[in-house]
Amino acid sequence: MATILAIESSCDETSAAICLDGNIISNHIATQSVHEKYGGVVPELASRAHMANIVPVVQAALQTANVEINNIDAVAFTQSPGLIGSLLVGAEFAKSLALALDKPLIAVHHMQAHVIANLIEEPRPSFPFLCLTVSGGHTQIVLCESPLQMRVLGETIDDAAGEAFDKSAKLLGLPYPGGPLIDKYAKEGNGNRFRFPEPQIPELNFSFSGLKTSILYFLQNAGTSLVYKEEFRATEEARAKFIGENLPDICASIQQRIISILLNKLKKAAAQTGIRDICLAGGVSANSGLRNSFTQLGQELGWNTFIPSFQYCTDNAGMIAMTAHYKFIAGEFESLNTTVSARAAW
Ligand code: KG4
Ligand code: ZN
């Protein structure tokens, strides 16, 4: 029997979870709303909010799980990637706790944990499986051979899928984070109305910066063209009128293109590897259009498709705790001298 306390603080969610023998029995998340008015995560404010949230969140996780802190067998934390100041709060808290309790410390890679989120609940994929991880900071196709053996087959060369949603929303004048709002308006719109280009990127990599540029020009030109030309530029009033009258169709068309970029690469990865157990992960997998298209594609191609429940899609300590469970079994512990890293390969 092993009871693991895990902490996640890589970006703007402070989270703590308890894993008891491979079962997540509590998962608490404190979301930071302080960033909304700035249109993006402000690193310094994120670190301060983690400092304020971490003790109550850990206490809540212990209480829900009905676990005494002295009965913890290991302490896990997110080591990389993320905002340095945010990561440090979770890491230093976890190290201090491990030292005080004289228990082992387990360091977890955040992107590996997003993939492992698919192993938390039934139905679980069989190994090997593919995972499309789509979040605000990352877009990756990962081949997972066993819980601790993973390989990135492709990833974005510029913006992440979540950034593509959020930056498009910003251009439309929608508040941060705009991804869920695009999803909401897209439900009432026609995704075939406006055709944004699909980039031709080699192998299994992604790019979203070209899409963002075409959306920028498209809106500047009030929908008349996707390219930049002074004579195409519309007045402020004309742009606002165009957006106001066509918001659902614009959102549906943007969303449709982001989804086709993602799923065409996933289809290619499945064909190349012959793997049929395919998962989604990350905050963008909350997108209803992506979920529907992914499930439908899976039915057409004979895949077994998996999407974690919402609380395990966005940043959460449950996925960190689950990864730590496998590391605990493998005896993969970390020295108390360890530190965090903004970017680190697996
Ligand atoms: O995984 P996550 O919670 O945090 C990161 O690690 O980045 O992902 C956050 C991202 C944001 O870009 C947010 O706009 C996007 O996920 N997102 C969505 C939806 N819900 C969250 N994007 C599109 N549609 C949604 N329903
Ligand atoms: Zn994440």
Image (spheres, rainbow, N blue to C red):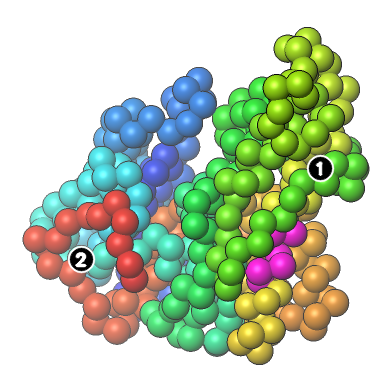
Residue 163 magenta-drawn? Answer: no
Looking at this view, is 337 or 159 the one in front?
159
Residue to which mark 2 is pinned: 105
Question: Taking 271 as reference, is 284 above or below it?
Answer: above
Numbered badge on residue 252: 1
Residue 235 visible to an observer of this rendering: yes
| Alpha carbon distance from label 2 to label 1 | 45 Å
Closer to the camera: disc 2 or disc 1?
A: 1
Q: In which quadrant of the rendered view does residue 166 lie?
A: top right
Looking at this view, is 166 or 308 the one in front?
166
Q: Main secondary structure of the magenta part?
A: helix
Which residue shows up at 20% across the image and 73% down it? 333
Q: Counting other residues with Cα less than 10 Å from the Cα at mark 2, is it few (<14), some (14-19), or many (20 or more)?
A: many
Which amino acid type corresponds to the residue marked 1 in the rendered image? Ala
Which residue shows up at 43% across the image and 33% down it? 41
Q: Counting other residues with Cα less than 10 Å from the Cα at mark 1, is it few (<14), some (14-19), or many (20 or more)?
A: many
Q: Secondary structure at mark 1?
A: helix
Question: Taking 186 as reference, is 77 above or below it?
Answer: below
**Residue range of the region highlighted in magenta in the rendering:** 260-266
Tell me which numbered mark, 2 or 1, is placed earlier along the sequence. Answer: 2
